[in-house]
Image (cartoon, rainbow, N blue to C red):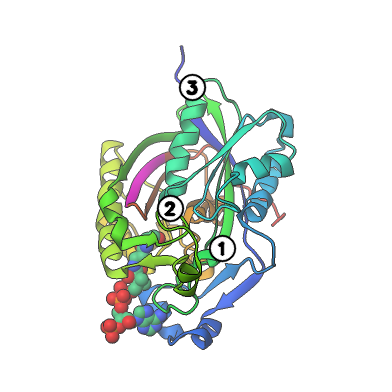
Amino acid sequence: MEKINAVITGVGGYVPDYILTNEEISRMVDTTDEWIMTRIGVKERRILNEEGLGTSYMARKAAKQLMQRTQSNPEDIDLVIVATSTGDYIFPSVASILCDKLGLKNAFAFDMQAACSGFLYLLETGASFIRSGKYKKVIIVGADKMSSITDYTDRATCPIFGDGAAAFMLEPTTEEFGILDSILKTDGKGLPFLHMKAGGSVCPPSYFTVDNHMHCVYQEGRTVFKYAVSNMSDVSAQIAERNGLTKENLNWVIPHQANMRIIDAVAHRMELPLDKVMINIQRYGNTSAATLPLCIWDYEDKLKKGDNLIFTAFGAGFTWGAIYVKWGYDGNKSSDN
Ligand code: UT7
């Protein structure tokens, strides 16, 4: 039997309209545009601030655009997987809400969670379903409403995060395109450094947890920074080496958008100029599971069939990794954003 690869055949995305600037953040906490730009590199982020709207709203917008761009019929979709840490509810999943809103009658759907590495894990998971030969059209979505778990009284975390969603279509091919190699890692010893203290089964919600802002991201930034730089750099260099990718034939690195200094360090380690690195942190901040596909959404028109891409991310867990993708079509971003 011929080998089946999973190729990305389209991208859709969505960011909310509301722009939260560094000036506005500087009125909320003791910080400055200059500190945020030099230490993190975020100028502004998008916030879903309409009451009653959650992650599934953004995921649905992204998936809808994806289906339009790929001219997909709802009945042809076999599977929907959403990577998120900020689902609308603890249950049911965002993916099951999407099935209803998008009119998908033949798909099964579930969410998965690997924090900021969620989309990286999802890319390999979605590809595995395609490689099995059983599924022909798989929608994968990275979506997070980080503003719903951000403490806007904590200057160490609130400038970092934003909201957004983006989606890929995965389909089978017998050509040598698509998701070709991956290195995915997990080290549960990262728990103390990056987590949400309450709201799970260890510490269910109470007046105490709400009063003490325990439903928000807790991060020991310096430690996470150190692990993010070394681990993302190591796996990116490793996957490049074992696939014969050099600074000459590697076209793009797509790093998680957590901190411009982390992105710089990864590029430096790979000896890549920044014009081969997808960067949109200045406009969206860290949208967690949405950063990687939002980069592709922004840069799609620059991509050519056959381009060599490395995706890399690091997040809570700790979770991290790198994935090698050979891009499968010439980018032709339509004017429907
Ligand atoms: O996406 C998941 C993975 N997450 C990451 O990859 C994030 C990794 N970590 C980081 O990006 C950085 O550690 C942060 C952006 C979170 C923090 O930057 P930093 O340069 O590591 O700052 P720091 O925590 O070491 O703090 C340095 C100083 C402290 O003051 P003192 O103790 O030296 O007087 C902080 O209180 O900067 C202070 N500070 C601020 N000052 C102005 C912290 N936040 C701010 C702020 N404005 N917003």
Which of the pair 9/31 is nearer the observer?
31
Instruction: Return the residue nearer the eye: 26 or 167.
Output: 26
* 279 sits left or right of 314 in the view: right
Q: Is residue 11 above or below residue 176?
A: below
Which residue is tagged 1?
163
Q: Report if residue 322 lies within the magenta region.
A: yes
What's the magenta region? 318-324
| Up/down of 242 relative to 208, above or below | above
At label 3, which amino acid type do we have?
A: Ser
SS label for mark 1 = strand
Residue 270 visible, this orientation: no
Question: What number is the disc on residue 115?
Answer: 2
Mark 1 is on which residue type?
Asp
Label 3 CA crowd tier, 10 Å (few <14, some 14–19, many 20+): some
Q: Residue at x 52, y 27 (%)?
A: 130
Classify mark 3 as within 8 Å of ligand 1 or not, answering yes or no.
Answer: no
The percent coordinates of residue 216 (x first, y second) are 46, 66
Q: For the residue with label 2, is its CB less than 8 Å from the closest atom of ligand 1? A: yes
Do we see residue 272 in this rendering?
yes
Give the labeled residue for mark 3: 132
The kind of secondary structure element at disc 3 is loop
